[in-house]
Image (spheres, grey):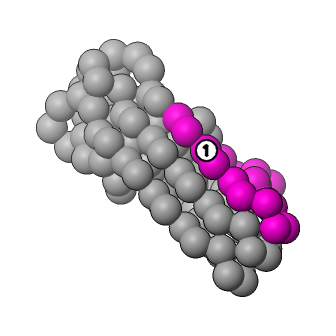
């Protein structure tokens, strides 16, 4: 699942957001969830954000469960909680969260 680019956003006012993603494929960079290049997941009010990502279990490097980088954001602007659960797959530098 990707939220990539400055025009990509998942937003809630008071409802909860739950996102689950699992990477597939046998190469590199098969991430469960990528939030990058200005992509945003945000709660504007009291909603909680829960993110669960698992990288591909087969394949090479960088199969992170959750990748947050290059200007990507997860934010709660009021009272909501943020929970991130990330499990890496693959080999070498495939950590749960990057």
Residue 72, magenta (yes or no): no
Which of the 4 image quarters holds residue 47? bottom right
Q: Position of residue 53 (x, y in %)?
A: 45, 41
Which of the 4 image quarters holds residue 73? bottom right
Query: Up-down: is 70 above or below 76?
Result: above
Left or right for 13, reference 56 = right
Left or right for 67, reference 95 = right
* Label 1: few (<14), some (14–19) or many (≥20) C-alpha neighbours in 10 Å: some
The residue located at (79%, 60%) in the rendering is 15
Q: Is residue 40 visible?
A: no
Identify the element where label 1 is drawn. Answer: strand
Which of the 4 image quarters holds residue 2? top right
The quadrant in which the N terminus is found is top right
The quadrant in which the C terminus is found is bottom left
Q: Position of residue 6 (x, y in %)?
A: 74, 59
Left or right for 74, reference 89 = right
Query: Up-down: is 93 above or below 25?
Result: below
Left or right for 16, reference 29 = right
Q: Residue furthest left?
A: 92
The residue located at (47%, 30%) in the rendering is 22
Q: Is residue 90 visible?
A: yes
Query: Up-down: is 97 above or below 20?
Result: below
Residue wearing tag 1: 19
**Over which residues does the magenta segment extend?**
3-21
The residue located at (40%, 52%) in the rendering is 85
Query: Up-down: is 86 above or below 31?
Result: below
Residue 4, magenta (yes or no): yes
């Amino acid at each position: 699942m990707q939220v990539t680019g400055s025009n990509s956003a998942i937003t809630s006012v008071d409802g909860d957001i739950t996102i689950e993603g699992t990477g597939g494929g046998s190469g590199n960079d098969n991430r469960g969830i990528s939030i990058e290049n200005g992509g945003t997941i945000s709660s504007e009010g009291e909603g909680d954000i829960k993110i669960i990502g698992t990288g591909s279990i087969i394949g090479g490097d960088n199969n992170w469960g959750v990748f947050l980088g290059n200007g990507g954001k997860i934010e709660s602007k009021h009272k909501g909680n943020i929970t991130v659960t990330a499990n890496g797959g693959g080999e070498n530098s495939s950590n749960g969260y990057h």
